[in-house]
Image (tube, helix red, strand yellow):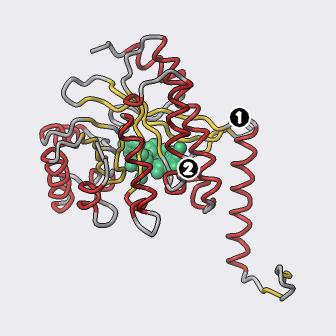
Amino acid sequence: VKQNGRGAAVTYTPDITVAFEAKKRAVLMIKSAISDGRLEPHYQPIIDLKSQKLRGVEALVRVRNTDGTLSGPADFWPALGEPQCSREIDEVMLELALRDFSLWKLCGLGIEFVSVNASTSCIRSSSYADRVLSKLDEYGLDPSELKIEVVESVFLGSESNDVRAVLERLSAEGVRIALDDFGTGYASLSHLRDYPINCIKIDKSFVSGLGQNGSNTAIVQALIGLGRSMKLEVITEGIETQGQLDFVSALGSDFGQGYLLARPMDAQALAQYATASPLP
Ligand code: C2E
Ligand code: CA
Ligand code: CA
Ligand code: CA
């Protein structure tokens, strides 16, 4: 039993207490990782399915624990449940991703874009566009070299006008906007029409069932077809088998991402990977 702010006694059930403790731990873990510089972007190659060439990378957050091990989003994001903290992660990741990308560019690695994930609380903050644009400027990058991945839930709720303003400003400056986990969310078709979206990412949950599951096959086929007819760039994620790769390539997905092609890796490994794969 604890006292709340107004002096009334509040009884916590054990489950709530456990969840609260887990959240507190996750938030503290992230805050200390950020202040110690232990957030570490890993980069997963995005491959042009026509030429088989590396075209871009997606930055994915990792935490370097004090014992040297690595944690991924599955280890802390569910417990985090904390918009402020997610936003801080995204801001740090943006900074690190642009820094790494600008170094690769100086080295002439020929990577065309870096993609970052932006959580809903980021996109809803009206100053986000300015912060992104000034970071691009700071690193001497062209806005078209950055892709921002958002999920469909950003379009829901009362802040959708703010979200539109942020995305339209970024888009007008040339930043590319990708709709992540496409097909898993809500009324996605009107979002494709009403917001400045350049790219859809077909969710790996559909791709994993290709071949074994008729509905997933039909869904992937329809989503790629939709993207192509709307002249959107199509990235298929979660490609793990040659069969899946052949299928989505034949349907005209522009890009592919998945363990079969390459796993996420740290900045140094990515630079080696890019050097080993010949330039287009
Ligand atoms: P996502 O944006 O859909 O990212 C793709 C996830 O799929 C990554 O997991 C990646 O490692 C994994 N993946 C890639 N290829 C394959 C494959 O062939 N098979 C399978 N089974 N998985 C594959 P990760 O890095 O654990 O990230 C999970 C989620 O956490 C991301 O899903 C994204 O929603 C979120 N996330 C990661 N980094 C950030 C970040 O910096 N900011 C925000 N807001 N979210 C992030
Ligand atoms: Ca993503
Ligand atoms: Ca995704
Ligand atoms: Ca996902």
Lateral position of residue 75 relative to residue 187, left or right: right
Q: Quadrant of the N terminus?
A: bottom right
Which residue does the numbered mark 1 point to in the structure image? Answer: 37
Query: Would you say the beta carbon of the disc 2 residue lies within 8 angstroms of ligand 1?
Result: yes
Q: CA distance from mark 2 to mark 1?
A: 17 Å
Query: Would you say the beta carbon of the disc 1 residue lies within 8 angstroms of ligand 1?
Result: no
Lateral position of residue 242 relative to residue 278, left or right: left
Image coords of residue 40 (percent x, y): 61, 35
Q: Which label sits on residue 271?
A: none
Q: Observer-nearest residue: 209 or 277?
A: 277
Above or below, comparing residue 162 to residue 148 in the picture: below
Q: Which label sits on residue 73?
A: 2
Characterize the local packing of mark 2: few (<14), some (14-19) or many (20 or more) Cα atoms within 10 angstroms: few
Image coords of residue 212 (percent x, y): 20, 56
Image coords of residue 195 (percent x, y): 31, 53
Q: Residue furthest bottom?
A: 8
* Residue beneath the point at 84% across and 81% down: 2
Q: Quadrant of residue 92?
A: top right
Q: Observer-nearest residue: 120 or 171?
A: 171
* Residue beneath the point at 33% across and 50% down: 204
Check contact, mark 2 vs mark 1: CB within 8 A: no
Q: Quadrant of the C terminus?
A: top left
Residue type for callout 2: Pro
Q: Observer-nearest residue: 81 or 126?
A: 126
Image coords of residue 169 (percent x, y): 41, 44
Secondary element type, mark 1? loop
Residue type for callout 1: Gly
Secondary element type, mark 2? helix
Q: Quadrant of residue 63?
A: top right
Question: N-terminal of the two: label 2 or label 1?
Answer: 1
Disc nearest the viewer among 2 and 1? 1
Q: Quadrant of residue 58?
A: top left
